[in-house]
Amino acid sequence: MSRPIETAVTIDHRLEAVLTAAPDLPASDVLLVCHPHPLHEGTMHNKVVTTLCRMGRDLGLPALRFNFRGVHNSQGVWDQGVGEIQDAIDAADWLLARYPGARLWLAGFSFGGYVAAQASRQLSPAGLLLVAPATSRFDMQSVRVDLPTWVAFNQDDDTVAPESMQAWLDQQPKAWVTEYIQPSGGHFYHGQLSALKRQAQAWLEGCL
């Protein structure tokens, strides 16, 4: 049986990406992961992003991470979040074209969480995984989830206001949302990546 490997790919001849998957095997579910803010050193190599991709790998899901426009070798320039949402939609379309008929799971960290939540309104994924979504920095008030959603953040987050994340959560339908809130670990989950992966993986496995 083929083992998952990381393969560099290009989306629409403009976005660099890495697909973690067993070569030439079909899949019934796929995972797309969006990275943090491009203007604050966010890339697809962020440790939370790669942790979520390893989670997908361990569940047997092809996992795609990509660089938003203007990051490293991805073409384009920063577009205030608007173009970046389109980047995520294009990446999802590429992934679903590669795995016809698969269900899409969208994940994102920080700014990537905002992008994933906004992109979900057009993509209609099977579910969302949002880690420290940027609720105090970008407009997520218009996003009301109506699909299985897993949300994680730490109460000592010093980048996104925990109060804003909790306020956004409080507005969401309880039937759809599972929370993983811890007292410490900061924005970048210092010393907590393994626990984050276990919790996210357990939730997603229960949904598959």
Image: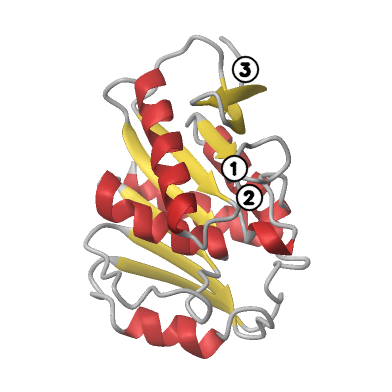
Question: At 70% from the left edge and 35% from the top edge, which residue is drawn?
Answer: 73
Answer left or right for 166 relative to 173: right
For this orientation, the residue located farthest to the right is 191
Distance from disc 2 to disc 3, alpha carbons, whole Å, reads: 20 Å
Mark 1 in CB contact with mark 3 (< 8 angstroms): no
Amino acid type for the residue under numbered disc 1: Gly
| Quadrant including the C terminus | top left
Can residue 5 be seen at all in this image of the molecule?
no
Q: Amino acid at mark 2?
A: Val
As drawn, is 101 to the left or to the right of 22?
left
Q: Is residue 156 visible?
A: yes
- Kindly identify which residue carries mark 3: 3
SS for callout 3: loop
Going from the N terminus, do you reach mark 2 or mark 3 first? 3
User: Horizontal and vertical percent for residue 58?
Assistant: 57, 35
Q: Nearer the viewer, residue 208 or 165?
A: 165
Residue indicated by mark 2: 49
**Quarter of the view holding residue 64:** top right
Q: Amino acid at mark 3?
A: Arg
Name the N-terminal-most of marks 2 and 1: 2
Q: Gap in Å between the C-alphas at discs 2 and 1?
A: 21 Å
The image shows residue 191 at horizontal and vertical percentages of: 78, 66
Mark number displayed over residue 76: 1
Which percent across, then down, holds residue 72?
Answer: 73, 41
> Total number of numbered labels?
3
In the rendered view, would you say 154 is above or below 72?
below
- What residue appears at the point 46 percent right and 39 percent down from the top-left corner? 31
Residue beneath the point at 41% across and 19% down:
98
Residue 122 position (above or below residue 1):
below
Question: Are the residues flagged by discs 2 and 1 in contact, CB closer than 8 Å?
Answer: no
Which mark is nearer the camera, 2 or 3?
2
